[in-house]
Image: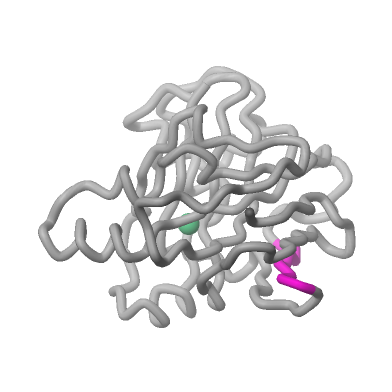
Amino acid sequence: MKIIAIGRNYIDHAKELNNPVPDTPVVFLKPDSSIIKKNKPFFLPLFSEEIHHEVEIVLKISRLGKNIASKFACRYFNEIGIGIDFTARDLQRNCMNKGLPWEIAKAFDGSAPLGKFVNVSKFRDVNNISFRLEINGKAVQQGNTKDMIFSPGEIIAYVSKFFTIKTGDLIFTGTPAGVGPVKKNDHLKAYIEDELLLDFFVK
Ligand code: ZN
């Protein structure tokens, strides 16, 4: 399986990092070794001094497809979850300054904690789902899929031009504003609507 991730998909987040608002989705990949499941702890890596949380809605792909039209894209995922796109912001800044790829900053081991998934049928409108991240009981990021620059359908249409999507693949759909550093012993809880789906510690 693969993880496809979208960067800068919320205007307020692009602005907080002084990045331009993109006219096509910003796409990168994470390997399966980035996944953390079952609320296991995230261990701060030694190679970074600045690991940022990015809470994101995650789509789980349920059928094989390529060159999918956005109007049919909703048929290609059947579950929605929430995850963290942990980012070594110091390494990413370095890569970007040199015009190099981001993988070491975005795709390292443990950089993709994943919560429980919910069947799409539970949601009235995929394009209007609220979600949030709390750290040590305080809400630090709050978002709604209606504020995405590229909707889930548009993302699937775009990425499937380049990559065949397969059952079990995951798509991280971008983070809203409020990203920031995590530190040892932080307690992260991520919710879709008011359901707690991901709950783990930084170690
Ligand atoms: Zn992200």
Coordinates of residue 88 in the picture (x, y in percent): 39, 58
Asked which quadrant contains residue 115, the reply is top right
Relative depth, front residue between 184 and 150: 184
Place of residue 166 in the rendered image (x, y in percent of width and height, measured from the top left): 54, 20
- x, y percentage for residue 101? 22, 47
Query: Based on the displayed image, in which of its 4 quarters is residue 175 positioned?
Result: bottom right
Identify which residue, 107 or 51, lies in the foreground.
51
Q: Which residues are magenta?
A: 128-136
- Residue depicted at 76% across the width and 43% down the height: 39
- Judge whether residue 134 is colored magenta: yes
Q: Quadrant of the C terminus?
A: bottom right
Question: In the rendered view, would you say 48 is above or below 108?
Answer: below
Name the outermost residue toward the left.
98
Q: Is residue 148 magenta?
A: no
Q: Residue at x 68, y 58 (%)?
A: 127
Count of marks overlaid on the render: 0
Vertical side of 30 occupied by 155: above or below? below
Residue 65 left/right relative to 129 = left
The answer to which of 106 and 136 lies nearer the viewer is 136
Of residues 179 and 130, the one drawn nearer to the viewer in this rendering? 179
Q: Residue at x 62, y 23 (%)?
A: 168
78 left or right of 23?
right
